[in-house]
Image (spheres, rainbow, N blue to C red):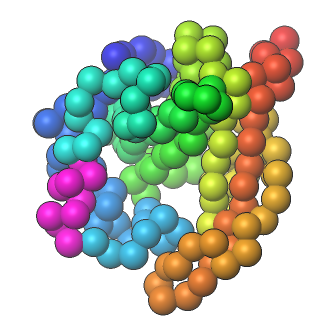
Amino acid sequence: MKWQTPCLILQSITVDDWPLFRRLYQEPEVMRYIADPMAESEIRARFEARLPAWDKHSERWLCLVMREKASGKALGITGFRPEWVPFQQAEVGFGSLPEAQGKGYGKESLLAVLDFAFNACGFHKMNATVTEGNIASRRLLEGCGFRLEGTLRDNYRLAGQWCNDWQLGLLAAEFAALKR
């Protein structure tokens, strides 16, 4: 799977993308609100789980590498994990290298992923779970039309502490209205 946006190329992850994936998962600034440090073997297992061919009926992540169109440089990953049966919903996720953050790439890539999910795949709703305090991710999601649906108290353990999660959602009809 491969498509382009004005500044990016989004392409299915391949075995050649292991250095990017490992770097993202080992970068404290990227993982601060996502997960505690992992052994390389665990990172490798997560990477390999994203390599098989994807379809919306699987429960595997659609994992796309974001590359800067002009240079071809890998900037991060984006995608979603479907819950097609019976919900026709998916959970979005993304992560950018520190040097790629704050440049609009996250929003550009997420809008392309949402367009694909809603218009090419027929999903009804996209969800996102964001650790409370991760203002940058919440703003990115809200900038793409997501709405806060609630706070899940003590929902996730991170760095030895229980954390609240913000639950955000976007319906297909809301996304279509944004594009008008």
Please name the predominant secondary structure of the magenta segment in the image: helix
* Magenta span of residues: 39-47
- Observer-nearest residue: 143 or 69? 143
Residue 122 left/right relative to 60: right
Position in image of residue 127 (x %, y %): 66, 42
**Is residue 175 visible in this depiction of the protein?**
no
Rendered residue at 45%/50% (across/down): 95
Quarter of the figure with the C terminus: top right
| Quarter assignment of residue 49 | top left
Residue 144 left/right relative to 51: right
The relative height of residue 53 versus residue 110 in the rendered view (above or below) is: above
Residue 41 lies in the magenta stretch: yes
Quarter of the figure with the N terminus: top left
Position in image of residue 154 (x %, y %): 67, 78
- Observer-nearest residue: 54 or 57? 57
Residue 46 left/right relative to 171: left
Rendered residue at 33%/75% (across/down): 37
- Observer-nearest residue: 158 or 78? 158
Rendered residue at 47%/84% (across/down): 159
Residue furthest to the front in view is: 86
The relative height of residue 10 versus residue 75 in the rendered view (above or below) is: above
Position in image of residue 44 (x %, y %): 18, 55
Rendered residue at 18%/50% (across/down): 19
**Is residue 54 visible in this depiction of the protein?**
yes
Position in image of residue 17 (x %, y %): 20, 40
